[in-house]
Image (cartoon, rainbow, N blue to C red):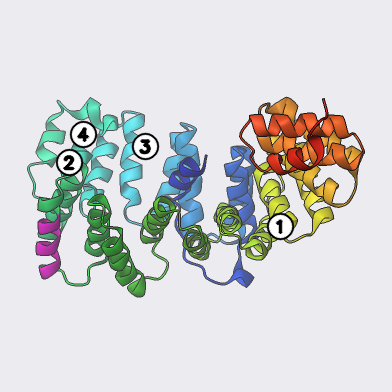
Amino acid sequence: MTKCIVRFFFVFLVSLSSYSQLPEKQIRAFVALMHKDTTKVLELLKDTLSTNPNQPVMIKTVGELYYKRKDYANAIRYYLKGLTYDSSLSLQLSLSYAQIKHTDSTLFWLQEYLKTRTKMPENKLKTLSEYAFLQNHSAWNNLWKKEWYNDYEQRLGEIQYLFEQKQINELMETIQSAKSLYKHDIQLILWEARAFWLGENPRQALKSLQSLLTIQPYNQEALLLKAEIFEKQLNHNKLAETYEDLFKAQPYFIYWKYLASLNFNIAYKYKEALENLKFYFLYDTLLSKAYYQAGIAAKNLKKHQEAIDYLTRSIKLDGSNSEAFYERGCCHYELNNLERAFSDLCMAMDLKPMQGKYFYQRGLINYALNRSLAACRDFERAKQYGYIKAESYIQRYCRGKN
């Protein structure tokens, strides 16, 4: 789910940095979108635009939603509003008209898009499936007789092609040649980082990204690539910090806070994980795995009752997660709620049998309940499933027992 959500929301960009200025309705709109409630999204965004129409990201978002719904008339209406702030929306206008086979408007807005800077490479633009109906149209052919791409744009197109073909040596040469002409260009620095990463040189990729982020601290594309590198390196602490930076860049996309907390948990930074999740719950109370992560953080902070409360919320939202029952059972055990602990461990086993740690934990519970034979059977099963820690209990308490 993570990569799909990230890729989907990445097209909606904004630059706000203070938590005190968080756009609450926008956050709730993107939470609704994450839970696939597009009706609620449109309701919230149209409401906020009625009071403050000067919100280009939200205007574009509404347009995108109507486009995905194939309501091209409303998509066009919002793209026209957003054109004041973002001239690249002329492409979305062209594609919307292409969907309803309105030739003149399709070509007009495509021509307007071709006048913009840093546009899609020509070969990609010409082969978009939406334009297939124009391929034999004389106006389409005449359109491409004009030279629309300057030297900089042609170089970017060549770089993208070489990147897709994974021709690393030629790619690096082309990027360095372009950088000598267009010094400190953000796009070229970003392509350099991508090229280093493609060439399996994460150190140089991160160095290029740091250079870019010094100029633009919250460049979303750079931060996403940085996150990808840290994820591959299993550097969960740095990955969590990068997700926090992404939230500063996109403060309406609360899912970054969940991803930060997930990685803080893996990095044993449970306090930071729980802080992020408590903030997350102000806006979204429907994500079971967020409550699960909060339970893990609270458990490791020895806040066992708080952990139980979070894990219970997680289970109510998704009763198929065996780990949530297991972790809650461990917390009940620590609080000496032994019957509840036993019940949770049995439920975890029903959902996911043959887990050594489940048998081990139930063995501890049975032992505390003075069920020594049942405890020894659980320890033996735990050992059978590879949970070596059970061996010490078997040696101490189970020898000579059937």
Choose between 76 and 359: the one closer to the eye. 359
- Identify the image quadrant of residue 305: bottom right
Query: Quick one: label 4 or label 1, which is nearer the N terminus?
Result: 4
Residue under pointer 2: 165
- Which mark identifies residue 96? 3
In the rendered image, residue 174 lying in the magenta stretch gets the answer yes
- Amino acid carrying mark 3 in the image: Ser
The segment highlighted magenta reads 172-180
Q: Name the residue under label 1.
A: 300
Amino acid under disc 1: Asn
Above or below: residue 97 compared with residue 263: above
**Is 166 positioned to the left or the right of 14 in the image?**
left
Could you give the CA–CA distance between mark 1 and mark 2, rounded to whole angstroms? 47 Å
Question: Which tag, 1 or 3, sits closer to the chain's start?
Answer: 3
Query: Element type at marker 3?
Result: helix
As measured in the structure, the alpha-carbon distance from the residue carrying label 2 to the one carrying label 4 is: 17 Å
Q: In 3D space, how far apart are the residues under numbered discs 1 and 3 (Cα atoms)?
A: 52 Å
- The tag earlier along the polypeptide, 3 or 4, is 3
SS for tag 4? loop
Q: Quadrant of residue 266?
A: bottom right
For the residues labelled 3 and 2, the Cα–Cα distance comes to 30 Å
